[in-house]
Image: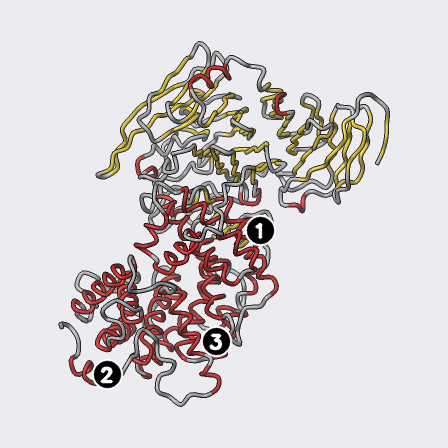
Amino acid sequence: MTGHSRRLFLQLGGVAVAGAMIPAHTGRTVNPVNDHFAPLRRRWREASAGSGFDPAAEPYRTRLARLGKTAAGYRDTMVPTGASLWPGLAFPSFTDTPARLRTMARGYALPGTGLTGDANLAVAVAEGIDHYRRRVYAAGADPAGNWWNWQIGVPRKLLDAAVLIGPHLTDPRSGALQEAVDHFLPECRLDDYEGTSTGANRVDLCTVMLLRAILGSDSGKVALAASALSPVFRYVFEGDGLYRDGSFVQHTSVPYQGGYGVVLLSGLATLFAVLRGSPWEITDPNRQVVFDGVERSFAPFVHDGFCMDLVSGRGIGREPYGDHRRGRDIAAAILLLGEAASAAERVRWQGMVKGWALRDTSRPMLDAAERSDLGFHARLAAVLNDDAIPAAEEPPGHRLPAMSARAVHRRPTWCAGLSMASYRIGHYEHGNGENRRGWHTGSGMLYWWGEGHGDQYSDSFWSTVDPYRLPGTTVSTRRLADGAGNAWGDTCPPARWVGGATDGTYATVGQHLNGFESTMEAFKSWFFLDDAVLCLGAGITSEDGVAVETVVDNRRTGAPLTVDDREGWAHLAGHGGYVLPCPTRLRTLREERTAGQVTRSYVTLWLDHGVDPDSAGYVYLLLPGASRAETRARAADPGWARVLANTARQQGVRVPSLGITAVNFWNDGAVGALTASAPCAVLVRERGDGTATLTVSDPRRDLDELIVTWDRPVAEVLGEHPLLTSATTGASLTLAFGRLADRGGGSKTVTVRLGRSGGTGRT
């Protein structure tokens, strides 16, 4: 054994620890209040370090033994000096040094590690905690750098380790650590719900406060940690938090289910589990907002086990297959949260996670859980082995959380996601040196996944893709500096018309696009249908002195590409097809792109609008999963989808086979059979049963009144709608809507019975 005080080991080595259980108290006189803290310590270990498995059974036996070996290695190589605790990890080492101490503490606290209850290991942890506290995390030290390290990152790991080793952190050392945490995280930090004390950060701060309370048996701080969560349980209308439409935003302007959202969900699941049954159990009735958020805010952005990058902020390029890791983290949080939810919610969530796990063939979820989270592995294995829990399929339909400028469209064999920017949602986020070339991810990036392509954006996509040619985007080719624009998502353009209308199955979505750090302007629309996405662009104008391009697609593949310019179609084998009206010239490129030691193949298809275009436009059809024959047949059927308008004033289409007419009104006016009194999105769907639905939205969020007329005989309006102030039926339909500005860009649907002839009527 090297690097430790042998005298200290001999002094504390006689403290007995039974099995893997953390002692309930520290040798002080126990009072009734302190009696409540023993179960809190036990539940913390179970929720954070792992439980629910047989340590003698595989794969747990091997993994726990490996944890013990790692913990022993850290113990034996720990050499406290004035500048480090381990050679090669020079202070402040905000991440690695506290993480190693926590790993050692888990080796002590968990069963089957070979070091379970080993006093020498626990004393080494205690010595390491105090050494780091004295050298780095001391009360009164200058909290230089990122505030998060001082208030969340470092104290959480140190306190976690301290709680796991129990009495081996003696009273003086425990008191000094508590004093340091109180200095950097005073109770007043939780007084106001603002700044960096919102959303996921607030959950993290409450977690640190709870650990501080458990370490010091402080009932007042436990009560504060629990009560300070209440603002998280309310829907927000701006800034950070959960929105009623399913959006989740952090850093004011970044959709973030895949980053901070995971932190919020897993943190709350842990806090619910630890405090359940205690005097401080979280009973705020608004906590149902979080439970509802599982299916409203998180599940829509998880596809076959991975979390879409369009809600993952600056973390998208952090690691290969990071989207699959984020999907596992969401699944783990959902299963743990299910223990505090209703029985019906728990069963639904288990079936949903089971479906994800079975379909994630790129990075099998159970195998990955074995390597990272034994508690999650045990829960997931139980669900997978329970034949009474059916695996849920991906639910087809369209989700349009307009407040975060995102859209997700699911069909039985494919899925698409759309990422836009608006006056309230940034083009991209960079910070801490991450995602410095994500400039155009908010310029209408259209992700899509077909069967067997769950790793399309996973395997080193972000490090190797051409950042100027992200699929679906319209961009100026002006060169940009790495990390251009303000950090932390503060890159919002001025445009307000971003969003669309959906009836839950189909959608019309639009973006008034202001190019990032560019004079370029464009009006982009996407019409999400059964087997296709119809993409329109208009008013593409720029004065940057460089070419402007619309990227039809950029697939990470080496598959064969067939292009027929004469018939206006292209097909990428094993992926899908593209239809373009003649005489559009499709540009293509096949290339190998390298980043570091990684090389990946790409096939890029794009439209060149030329240098400084003036009101350029485009039309193309994306056919995910289509065969070559299907693509060619669609190109030969120009009447399948009819473009009614494609200008900077309106963009609209008619799809007769689906009974769909959809228009994005950038300005008031008339398109085909539809007329709107103000900018809006309108989706009409005629059904085969003699009824139709008319769905509207106010993407700009500024309308006090909207009047929409449909030149089609309508007999009556079926049902009432709270925003419908009047309706005139007969030879045509006129609907007057009240104040839509307060509806967050959400869609409102009215159902009508179709008529056969003229006449008038009012309802």
Element class at badge 3: helix
Element class at badge 2: helix
Q: Residues within 10 Å of mark 2 (few under 14, many from 20)?
A: some
- Amino acid identity at mark 1: Tyr
The part of the image, by quadrant, that contains residue 671 is top right
Residue at the spot of label 3: 221
Q: Please give the name of the residue rendered at 33% of the width and 48% of the height, measured from the top-left corner.
A: 433
- Amino acid identity at mark 2: Leu
For marks 2 and 1, give the one nearer the viewer: 2
Disc 2 versus disc 1: distance between alpha carbons? 52 Å
Lower sequence index among marks 2 and 1? 2
Does residue 11 appear in the picture of this structure?
yes
Q: Position of residue 138 (x, y in %)?
A: 32, 73
Does residue 84 appear in the picture of this structure?
no
* Above/below status of 17 relative to 194: below
Q: Quadrant of the N terminus?
A: bottom left
Residue at the spot of label 1: 243
Element class at badge 1: loop
Disc 3 versus disc 1: distance between alpha carbons? 29 Å
Q: Quadrant of the C terminus?
A: top right
Disc 2 versus disc 3: distance between alpha carbons? 29 Å
Q: Nearer the viewer, residue 154 or 383?
A: 383
Disc ID at residue 12 = 2
39 vs 242, left or right, is: left
Q: Residues within 10 Å of mark 1 (few under 14, many from 20)?
A: many
- Amino acid identity at mark 3: Lys
Lower sequence index among marks 3 and 1? 3
Q: Position of residue 168 (x, y in %)?
A: 29, 79
Lower sequence index among marks 2 and 3? 2
Q: Please give the name of the residue rendered at 47% of the width and 66% of the height, measured from the top-left corner.
A: 273
719 vs 584, left or right, is: right
Q: Position of residue 643 (x, y in %)?
A: 59, 20
